[in-house]
Every structure is written in structure tokens, then in C-alpha cells.
Amino acid sequence: MRKPFFFLSVLLSCVVALSPAFSQSTKGIISGVVKDSGGAVLQGAKIELQPQGRPISTNELGEFNIQEVNPGTYTLTVSYVGFGPYVTSFTVVAGQTAHVEAVLKVANASDDVIVSADRPHGEAEAINRTLAAENILQVLPADVIVSLPNANIADALGRMASVTIERDEGEGKYVQIRGTEPRLSNTMIDGVTVPSPETGVRQIKLDTIASDLVDSVEINKTLQANIDADGIGGSVNLVTKTAGEVPAATFYGVGGYTPIIGGRTVDQMGGTVGKRFGADKKLGLLLGGTYDFNGRGINDIEPSPTTSSAVPHYDSMDLRDYIYYRTRWGMTASADYKLREGSDISIRGLFSTFRNWGNKWVYTLNDGDVPQYSQDWRRPNMAVGSLALQGKHVFNASTVNWSVSAGRSRSLSGSGSVKYSWVGDPNIDCTNVPGVSVNRPGWSSGCFGPGADNSEDPNNYKLKAFAPPTFGKSAQVNLQASASYARFYHIGTHFGTIEFGGKIRSAHKFDDTYDESFTPSGTTLVAAHPEWDSDFTDPNYYDKTYHYGPVTDYNKVESYVNHNAGGFTLSGGPGVNPNNYDFVERIPAGYVMNTIELGSRLRLVTGIRFEATHLDTLSFDPNLNPAPTTLTFKAGGDSLDVLPSASLRFAVDKDSDLRLVYGRGLARPDPQDVTAAVGQPDITTTPATVSIGNPNLKAEYANNYDILYERSFNNAGLLQAGYFYKDISNPIVTLQTLTTNYKYNPGAPTLVSEPSNAGSAHVQGIEVGFQQRFSYLPGAFRGAGLSANYSYTNSQANEVDPLRTDSPAMLRQAPNSWNISPTFDTKKFSMRVGMTFDDKMIYAYQYENLAYVYDDNGNPVLNPNGTQETTPNPQVNGVAGPAGDNYLYSHFQFDTQASYKLPWGFQVYGYGLNLNNEVFGFYNGSPQYVVQREYYHPTYAGGLRWTSHHE
């Protein structure tokens, strides 16, 4: 890292050396700030200077700065959707700064709620920032995020066009942008790539970050040269809070209830304080924090379809019950200082931690076989942190930006478990039978009783194994430095900016986690230990469709094991987890980008980015037998990518634009995929199965094409309609090879799963978004508004598996998704409804449609005569059958929130989350082949908020 910091030091020295040149300039400067009548700054306001015709936009502090202005008289126009224009004239003097403070008023008196109400003000900001961006950008300001019950950042993003989310335990977890899986998108904090807290992957588990820690969330849907290239689907940027012009303090508290498993509670509290200091308000300081507790309850069934039966039938089914104690807390802080007009320096930080603690109890019913029982003790602890020192310096026609940052994430602990073995009647009458509906498989009465011989009787089990939560941790540190130089120029009447910059990112990720397991030396009957009993009950489990019996207490079993260690055999420990690795990645990058106005209607941005990748990995050597206990296998390599981009923006008229965009992006492999971990086969399956890494794995690439029409309306309105196409090469897929020569299972058939680059893919889609306040309507209707979007995507993956000849859709591509959000606002009352729909999507490929036999080495080959001589997984009903691909169910959710302003800055609000009690789950091939269906029930909550800057 020495060279990047040396380069940065030289650049800063040049900045200081150039400072005296400013006062000697023969030209002048125009600077200013744009506010509304309530004193709030307006980010993304459009500034036009005539007769020069140089359009720019205000920054996050509502400020603008125009350098290199010839002496003379000018007219400056400020426009902002939802507000009337501001026009002023003034004279520029050589070597001096003309300051403008523009105060905008709403376009008409009936729309004054945009100034006095939080969310309408945020919606207007989002529209203007979207229109001001050079690339295709979507924005969610904080006021919009908190207007619905969004527990974390993923929940908020799921309400945007072409964004679907993967849910986990009732909350959003990953975002899936434009029909691409989570690993094809990038996440940043203040423009700095942040590492994933999870071991082995790059994508950020966004439920780690509370939604009220950020000032806004941006999705960059297209790439340009000054943006990191690893965003095939898109890039999510979390913008942290900074102190505004008006001193502000906000505090809130909320409590709620979920009617499941006897009732679970939710609590949330937080606050933010920010102020600018000094006569000129040059110094800004802000501090914020949040805490929330989510007592989640889950009723879940997980059947295993019989792959040879067209009529839904199940080999087994888990009855799962969960209680969670999900806690999230975080802090954000910033300090910034204005050195002078157009130049400032800031430091920003964010830290958020998430403890997804809980208990799980599982009764497993097996068709024609004995049941099983187990429980989990979940203690994962994840955290994400970011710290960035950034600066911007404007000198005459030049602008220098620089940044030095560090990001760290980590995952501690994991899950412990207790497993039990059946000691009851081996001939128990427990079989799968038709259920009350296709989604609720039935089981014979012998599974549950009456009598003692049933799946829930403690007398029928003995202790099989006890495992404490995972030891060790997985962590990643990113160190990054960047700098850029931009120069304003003009060729005749055409104004432009040439920009070039460099960046280096160094990432170090490791996994040293391991598990231990205690197996009793003798027979330890559950019936002999009534002290293990738990007081947990769930008499209404799954609406009483199934009975849920008594359960044991993990802590009590743990105490027994600890006090009787001599009666157990310990296995596992440090150095035996085949997934351990050490991963170092360095990515130096450079770019050149040019922006030019080609007349009054055309704006062209072109650029080229270079990104090199140097990779070193260390893992267990897969060629050693017996398996090693230290990381000795080295792999890695170097690559260089050239990534062009271009965008053309044509002003159809004063209110509408047409954008044409091209950009080339990439997605580097996950750390867990390129480490050559030793795979220990699972011999309980037929054939045995094992997963290994692939150190020769390469990045995948995409050429991305976009066309977008956008039109703004008075009364804070925006219409967007667009089409996109992504041509993906070198996609990373999991290939399976059947062999009898696998080192750790010689002579027996073993199905080896390995990530590989195979085939090609494409995804295309249309996006339509509409937002409008109906303040032009009469009477009470003028408080109404609507925000809605719809997306349709279509994709195809070719040759992603040698054992299938069809071309399935890409993973995580939902054909249809939409959001409809009616709103109603007055100066005191505000209400919003959120209706979100995500269509079904493939979660994992597993269908195989080739008839095949085995060669002498046990590898599958095509049967020349076309008959099925050997099929380990007989296909029924083709891809739509029970052995088809694994799908996520479509998901529709209905949420609402309302607030009312009280005197002295207080506001009372309440919300309803998941009011329709939507199901979450998976199926194989077709919805009737159920794999998982779980319910959370609605959550109802209310709270109080106080803010110091009130009307």
C-alpha cells in the first residue's frame, strides 16, 4: 500500500502549491446554496448560467460552485422539480466570488406539504437527484426509507424498480438487481466498497445494517469509468449522514407485537444530533445511533418430495419451530470542514452489528421409517464498519478529489446443535398421506399418537451428539486509496470536463472457524433426564394443522455435557474445517472519462477503465492424503481488464430526456469458490456427494445496454420507462462430475460439485416507474399521491450444466415484480401503503434432462441409443416435476404506516408489517412439490418521535 499513499501525498502537495494561484486569476467564481422556504437544503437542484449555458447540480449540502467565469453580467436559473424556478442576475468581477443564496418556493400553494412534511420532501429530493445524475440512478432518501416499516436496508431497496430481495427469517437479506443474483452486485458506503461479513462470499448481508443509519441509498444501475466495475447487476451506495445548515436533533422510540408462538415483541430506539459551528458554519459535526430488538417467531415445514412420483408424495418432512432474538445496533458519525468556497474535507464512519440469535426445534417425519428429533442453538454475530477520509478541492478550472478509507467486516460464532436417535418401536406406523391441502402434506395418525409410540414422545429418543456453537471467526479488511483530477474546458460554445483518476483496493479475508462435536460413549436416554425439558410450547403451531410436541432445552443439555465430559468422545477442533482459507486480493485501477455538451440538447459521457487483479489464496492441499491440518496449498494469479463505457443524454424538451448507455462490467469469483478446499464426501447419500473449490476460476463479464426515457412533472412527479439488456460471458456455475476415483472415497461413486466457468447467459427487461403528487385535485383529494413501478425481466442461461440440454432462466431472475404505494399527506398527517410483489425465481439448478450411462471411470456419458439405462434421479414431468429446479415462491406483502404531528416537535406514528401474513418458501419444479413453507404473522407497532427543527 506504500505507493498509493505516496501518490496521494504528492497530489495533496500539488493542491497546496496551487492555492496561491487562485487569488491571481483573471476570472471569477460563482458559488451558492439552494434551500427551500423552510431552510432545508435542496440536493440535485439544476443550475443554469446564461449566456454560458453550463448546467451543473447542487451537492449533498445544497451547494454549487462554478469556476473560470469571465467577468461580466449573467443570469442564473435554479430549477427543482416540485418547486418554482429561481432566477437572478448579477455581475462577476475578476478574481472575486459572487455568492448566491437561492430560496425556492413550491410551484403552487396547494403543494406546500412538500416543505412541511418529511416524506414528500424526500420524494422530491429523490426525483431531482435522479434527474441530475450522469448515469442511470435511483435514490431513496432517509425520509422515504422510514415512511414504511423497513427494518433494514434490503427491505427498503426491495421497494424500488427492478429490485427483488432474498428474505431470511422475515426480513430482507440480499438485493437482486435487474434479474441478477446477489453476487453480481456491489455494495459501497460513501462510494467505498465494503466487505461481506459472511465467510466465503462477496455480497453484503444487508440485514446487518439498520435502515435508519444512512441519509440515503443509491442504486447505480449503469456503469461509467469513475465507478468500480464489479456491478453487473448494479451498485448499491449507502450515503451516511452529515450535519446540515440547520442544527438538528431527532430521537425516537417504538414498540410492537407479533401474535405468534404466544406473542413476540419488537422494540426500536435511536437518535441523531448534528450542527454546524463557527460564524461561517464551516465545521459540521454529526452523531447518530440506533438499536432494535426483533422477537421473531417462525412456523415452518420442510418436506422432501419423492422425485419418482408425479402425484405429490414426500419421503420426509421437517416440522420446524423457531424463536429468535434478533438484535441490531449501530452508530454513524461525521465531521466536515469547509476550507473555502468549493473545497472541503470530511471524515465519515459507520458501524453496525447484528446478532441473529435464536432457537430451532425440528421433528423429522420419515415415510415408512422412524422419526428424528434435533434442536439448534443459533448465535451468529455479524458486523460491518467503514471509515473514510475524503476531500474535494476546486482551483480555477480544476477539481481534485481524494479518499483514504478502511472497511472491516466479521462473523463470529455460529450454530450449535443437539441431535437425538430413535429408540422407540422400529415399526412405528408413520407414513405420508394426503393432507388438508396441496401445500400442507398429511401424515398418518401413528406419527403423532395416540399412545406412547409417536414421534413426540421423549421416551423414544436417546442423545446422539452435542455440538457447541462454531468457534473462531471469519473476517475481511479492505484498505483503499483513490484520487482524481478533473479539468473544465470549452471548445467554442461546447463545454466539457476531462477527468482521470486512480484507485487501489487491498482486501484480506480469512476463515479460521471450526466445529466440535461430543458423542456419548454409552446410551443416554432422554427419558432419564427430565431436567432437560424446556418450558417452550406452541399449541397453535401452523394453525393447528400439525401437533408440536414437547422439546428439550439446549442450555440444560450443554450443562449436562460439561459436567460429564468423561462420558463423551470429542471430535473436530482447530485445523479440520476443510473450508478454512486465507485470501488476499489487490485491485489497482485507473480511468479516463470525458463529459461534453454537444449543443443545447446533447450531453455525451465517454470513458475507459482499467482494472488489474492480483490474487493469492492459501487453503488445504487437496492432493494430500490423509487430509492436512494446515493451510499449505497456494494459488492465485493476475489479470487485467479493459472496460469501456459511454452514455448519451438527449433533451427531448425542457421536461424530458432520453438516455442511451453502454458499460462493460465484471463479477469476480467468491473467495469460497477459488480456494481449493479439501472436500470430505457425505457418504450418507447415494451416490456420495462432495463440494470442492476451483483455483482456476475466472471472473465473469457483461456488456450492458440501456435506453431510458424520463419525464418530470409539476407537483413532484416523474415518469421513467426503459429497456436494458445484459450479455454475460463466462458465467460461474456449479458443475457436477460423477467419479469412482475421488481420493477420499476410492472405488465408490461420488458426485463432485465444483464451481466452473461454463456457457453464456443474457438477461433483458423493461422498467416503468411513476411518481406523482395529486395536489391539483380538489378538496381532500389534493393530499393524495402515488409511487409505483413495474419490471418485467427475461433471461436465458446456455450450457450451464452438461447434464441438461435446455436453457433455463438465470438464477434469481423474477419475471414480474412491482410496487404500488399510495400516499396521503397534510401538514400534520401522513400515511403510506406499501404493496410489493416478487415473482417466482430459480434459486438453484438441479434438473437434469439427459438420459445417460457411466463410463469405466464412473462419469456420465450420453446414451447413444437414447434409452435410459441408468438414471440415479428419474425425471417425472420434466423440468416441472418434483426433480425440477429449486424455486423461490412468488411473494406479495402488504405494509402500511401513518404518522401525526403533535405540538413542540413531537410526532406519533404506527405501522403494520406483513399484514397479509405472506408465506415464504421453496418448491421443486412446480408449486405443488413443496420444499419449504414458513409463516411469520403480522407485526403491529407504534412509537413517538421528537425533532428539534419543527414548524
Image: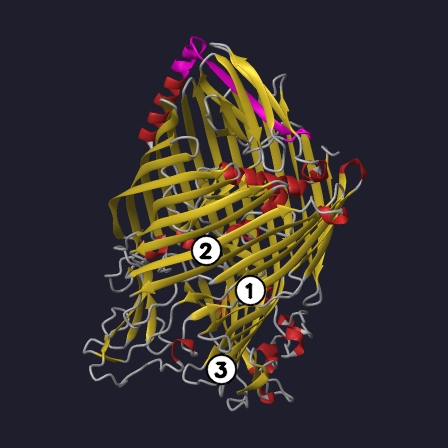
Residue type at the position of mark 3: Tyr
Q: Earlier in the sequence, mark 2 or mark 1?
A: 2
- Quickly name the residue at label 1: 891
Q: In the image, is residue 162 above or below residue 843?
A: above
858 within the magenta span: no
24 within the magenta span: yes
Q: Would you call the spot at circle 2 few (<14 residues within 10 Å), some (14-19), or many (20 or more)? A: many
- Left or right of 208? Residue 950 is right
Q: Split into 4 quadrants, where in the image is the C terminus?
A: top right
Give residue 766's mark.
2
Residue type at the position of mark 1: His
> Considering the numbered disc 2 on the image, is that residue within a helix, a strand or a loop?
strand
Residue 294 image-quadrant placement: bottom right
Residue type at the position of mark 2: Ile
Q: Identify which residue is drawn at 36% across, 44% down.
A: 229
Q: Inspect this view and state whether residue 604 appears.
A: yes
- The x, y position of residue 291, in whole percent, is 64, 46
Q: Earlier in the sequence, mark 1 or mark 3?
A: 3
Q: Earlier in the sequence, mark 2 or mark 3?
A: 3
Q: Which residues are magenta?
A: 16-40
